[in-house]
Image (tube, grey):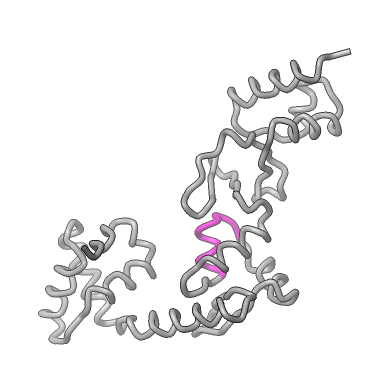
């Protein structure tokens, strides 16, 4: 009879070669039943993917999770929260001003609209219409209240389309410019006052915020 401890070590060696495995080929490689392999995975510690219907596995020691608890290997996504539903709830709850299905889908690299609708119907999240989309909010009333306040403040910071185009044009001309400089230059061209915070909101909307430096902390 095979030594389970040795088999776990053998399994770890397989994950050293390939960080993600599906259960069937892993079972064949180890020459154990799928039930036994699941037990070995539990001993070693593992994550199952929130993409691909949870069919991919990686050892708990492998992922280097982002601040939001996400890690991707090629097109396979893993989350500290676990499944897609738990990940969606966690991201919605932790967001400052709620998130749309589109924003969540971009972050998770998968379509999640139908799952969000199901979560809403079960009361796991709230939602509020904003334009043509719904913004998903935390189920907790107090947390959702804070998110609604932040969402209202964020809407107040949004630029009209014609002004936003001017800001983006300035960014194209000088992509290394700081938000305050972009705001000043676009203000001069548009003949209206544009705040630095409005530039940051604009870049967040277009998923360009990673290009900008974070605002300086108060001393």
Q: Which residues are magenta?
A: 101-111
> Does residue 201 belong to the magenta stretch?
no
- The residue sitting at 57% across, 68% down in the picture is 93
- The residue sitting at 66% across, 59% down in the picture is 86
Query: Which corner quadrant holds the N terminus?
Result: top right
Q: Position of residue 138 (x, y in %)?
A: 60, 73
Query: Which corner quadrant holds the C terminus?
Result: bottom left
Q: Which residue, as the protein is rendered here, is positioned at the far left?
A: 188
Q: Which residue, as the protein is rendered here, is positioned at the far right?
A: 1
- Above or below, 173 against 6 in this view is below
Q: Position of residue 76 (x, y in %)?
A: 59, 44
**Dominant secondary structure (helix, strand or loop) of the stretch shown in magenta:** helix
Left/right of residue 217 with respect to residue 40 in the rendered view:
left
> Does residue 103 belong to the magenta stretch?
yes
- The residue sitting at 21% across, 67% down in the picture is 179
Left/right of residue 195 with respect to residue 76 in the rendered view:
left
């Amino acid at each position: 009879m095979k030594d389970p401890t040795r088999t776990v070590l053998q399994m770890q060696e397989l994950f050293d070669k390939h960080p993600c495995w599906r259960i069937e080929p892993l079972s064949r490689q180890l020459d154990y039943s799928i039930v036994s392999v699941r037990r070995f995975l539990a001993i070693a510690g593992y994550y199952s993917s929130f993409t691909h219907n949870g069919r991919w596995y990686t050892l708990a020691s492998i992922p280097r999770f982002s601040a939001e608890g996400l890690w991707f290997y090629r097109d396979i996504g893993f989350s500290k929260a676990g499944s897609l539903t738990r990940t969606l709830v966690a991201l919605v709850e932790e967001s400052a001003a709620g998130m749309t299905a589109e924003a969540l889908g971009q972050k998770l690299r998968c379509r999640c609209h139908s799952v969000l609708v199901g979560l809403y119907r079960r009361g796991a999240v709230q939602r509020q219409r904003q334009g043509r989309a719904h913004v998903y909010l935390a189920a907790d009333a107090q947390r959702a209240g804070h998110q609604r306040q932040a969402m209202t403040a964020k809407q107040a910071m949004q630029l009209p389309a014609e002004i936003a185009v001017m800001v983006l044009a300035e960014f194209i001309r000088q992509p290394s410019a700081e938000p305050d400089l972009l705001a000043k230059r676009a203000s001069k061209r548009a003949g209206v006052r544009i705040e630095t915070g409005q530039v940051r909101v604009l870049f967040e909307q277009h998923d360009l915020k990673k290009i900008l430096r974070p605002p300086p902390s108060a001393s």
